[in-house]
Image (tube, rainbow, N blue to C red):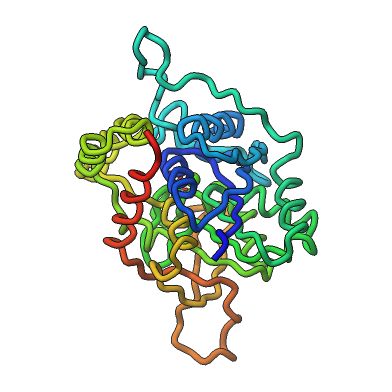
C-alpha cells in the first residue's frame, strides 16, 4: 500500500508537536505539507514551532510549511500559553547544549510563499481523492479555503478534525473544547460544508494519556534527540497538569487524530448531526450532537463521523513505539 498523502493544519502547541513527530515516524503516512494557524500561540510563533520541529525530526523529505490565519474569522485570538508555555512548546529556550548554546536553535526553514489556504487549495485540487487533511488547531484556514474554493476543496479524500466535546465536558470552558471554542464560526462553516469529516473529540482524546513516567522510561531506554525533545517539551506541562488534575499526565489530543489515519481500527466512529454554538455566553463553542433515539425523518441527517470509542492502550503503545523508531 502506498502511504496516505496528508496535510497537517496545526497550531503548535505541545501535543501538536507530538502529533507531527508521530506522523513523521509513521511509514503509512507521507506528510506533504504543514499549514499553520493561530490558536495555542500567535501564528508567527506556531509557524516557527512547526519549523523547529522539522529541525528536531530531520525528515528525508521536508514538506513545505505555509503560514495561515493570524486570528479567528470574527473574533480576537485567545491563546493557551498558560498551558503550552510562552513559546507554545514548554519554554524550550531554558535548555542549553554543551558550550552554553541553545539546545533548540532558531529554525532556518524557508516558508512557502503561498498562504496556508492557497497551499491547501492547490494541493488538494491537484490530487482529487488522494489527500487527507488533518486539522489539529482552530478551523480558520480550512473554513476560509472552503469559502474561497469549494469545488477544489471537495476533491479532498477525507478531513480529520481534532475538536469538540460530545458527551465529555469541555476543556476550556465547562461546555467547549479549545479548537472549536477559539473559532466557532469556522467550525460551524466546516461542519456544514458537506465534506467527508471525521471528528476526534475530547471524549476519546482524554482517554489516551502520556504520563511523565512513560516519558522518563522512553528517555532512559532510547535516549535519542527526539525522545529528549519529548521530555523537554512536556516537562513544564506535567507540572501544570499535576496542579490542575492531580496527575502528571497529558492527553494525546492531536496525536490521536494522526493515529486515526495510521490505523482507523483504533477508533469507533458514529454518524451524528453536530451543530456549533456560535453565540456569546457560557455555551460558546459547544458542539451539540443529535443523539436522540428517534427515526431519521425526525432529525437532520448526519454531517460528521464522530469517534466515540478508542482502544487507548493500543494507541499509546503505537505512539511510544513510533517515537522510538526515529533516529538519534
Ligand atoms: C486542543 O487544544 C489545543 O490546546 C491542543 O493543541 C489540541 O489541539 C485540545 O482541546
Ligand atoms: Ca492543536
Percent across and percent down for residue 144 are: 72, 51
- Quadrant of the image containing the N terminus: bottom right
Q: Nearer the viewer, residue 315 or 167?
A: 315
- Quadrant of the image containing the C terminus: top left
Q: Quadrant of residue 166?
A: bottom left
**Residue ID at (75%, 34%):** 113
Q: Is residue 237 above or below residue 253?
A: above
Q: Quadrant of residue 303?
A: bottom right
Q: Nearer the viewer, residue 179 or 103?
A: 103
Left or right of 265, for residue 247:
left
**Residue ID at (54%, 41%):** 11
Q: Is residue 58 above or below residue 107?
A: below
Q: How many marks?
A: 0
Left or right of 157, for residue 318:
left
Percent across and percent down for residue 162 are: 49, 56
Percent across and percent down for residue 305 are: 52, 72
Q: Is residue 212 above or below residue 170?
A: above
Percent across and percent down for residue 234 are: 33, 35
**Residue ID at (60%, 38%):** 62
**Residue ID at (37%, 62%):** 204
Left or right of 73, for residue 93:
left
Q: Nearer the viewer, residue 324 or 74?
A: 324
Amino acid at each position: 500500500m502506498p502511504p496516505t498523502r496528508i496535510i497537517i493544519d496545526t497550531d503548535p502547541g505541545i501535543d501538536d508537536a507530538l502529533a507531527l513527530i508521530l506522523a513523521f515516524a509513521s511509514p503509512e503516512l507521507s506528510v506533504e505539507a504543514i499549514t499553520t494557524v493561530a490558536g495555542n500561540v500567535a501564528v508567527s510563533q506556531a509557524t516557527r514551532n512547526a519549523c523547529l520541529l522539522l529541525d528536531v525530526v530531520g525528515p528525508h523529505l521536508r514538506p513545505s510549511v505555509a503560514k495561515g490565519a493570524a486570528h479567528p474569522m470574527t473574533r480576537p485570538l485567545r491563546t493557551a500559553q498558560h498551558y503550552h508555555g510562552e513559546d507554545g512548546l514548554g519554554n524550550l529556550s531554558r535548555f542549553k547544549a554543551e558550550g552554553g548554546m541553545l539546545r533548540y536553535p532558531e529554525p532556518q526553514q524557508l516558508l512557502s510563499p503561498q498562504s496556508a489556504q492557497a497551499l491547501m487549495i492547490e494541493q488538494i485540487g491537484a490530487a482529487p481523492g488522494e489527500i487527507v487533511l488533518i486539522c489539529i488547531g482552530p478551523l480558520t484556514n480550512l473554513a476560509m479555503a472552503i469559502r474561497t474554493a469549494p469545488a477544489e476543496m471537495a476533491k479532498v479524500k477525507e478531513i480529520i478534525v481534532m475538536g469538540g466535546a460530545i458527551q465529555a465536558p469541555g476543556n476550556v470552558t465547562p461546555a467547549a473544547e479549545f479548537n472549536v471554542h477559539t473559532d466557532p464560526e469556522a467550525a460551524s462553516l466546516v461542519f456544514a460544508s458537506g465534506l467527508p469529516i471525521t471528528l476526534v473529540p475530547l471524549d476519546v482524546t482524554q482517554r489516551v494519556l502520556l504520563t511523565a513516567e512513560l516519558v522518563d522510561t522512553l528517555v532512559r531506554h532510547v535516549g535519542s534527540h527526539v525522545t529528549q525533545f519529548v521530555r523537554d517539551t512536556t516537562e513544564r506541562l506535567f507540572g501544570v497538569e499535576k496542579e490542575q488534575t492531580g496527575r502528571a499526565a497529558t492527553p494525546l489530543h492531536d496525536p490521536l487524530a494522526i493515529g486515526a489515519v495510521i490505523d482507523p481500527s483504533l477508533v469507533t466512529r458514529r454518524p451524528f448531526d453536530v451543530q456549533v454554538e456560535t453565540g456569546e455566553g457560557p455555551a460558546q463553542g459547544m458542539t451539540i450532537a443529535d443523539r436522540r433515539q428517534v427515526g431519521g425523518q425526525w432529525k437532520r441527517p448526519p454531517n460528521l463521523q464522530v469517534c466515540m470509542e478508542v482502544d487507548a492502550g493500543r494507541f499509546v503503545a503505537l505512539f511510544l513505539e513510533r517515537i522510538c523508531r526515529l533516529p538519534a
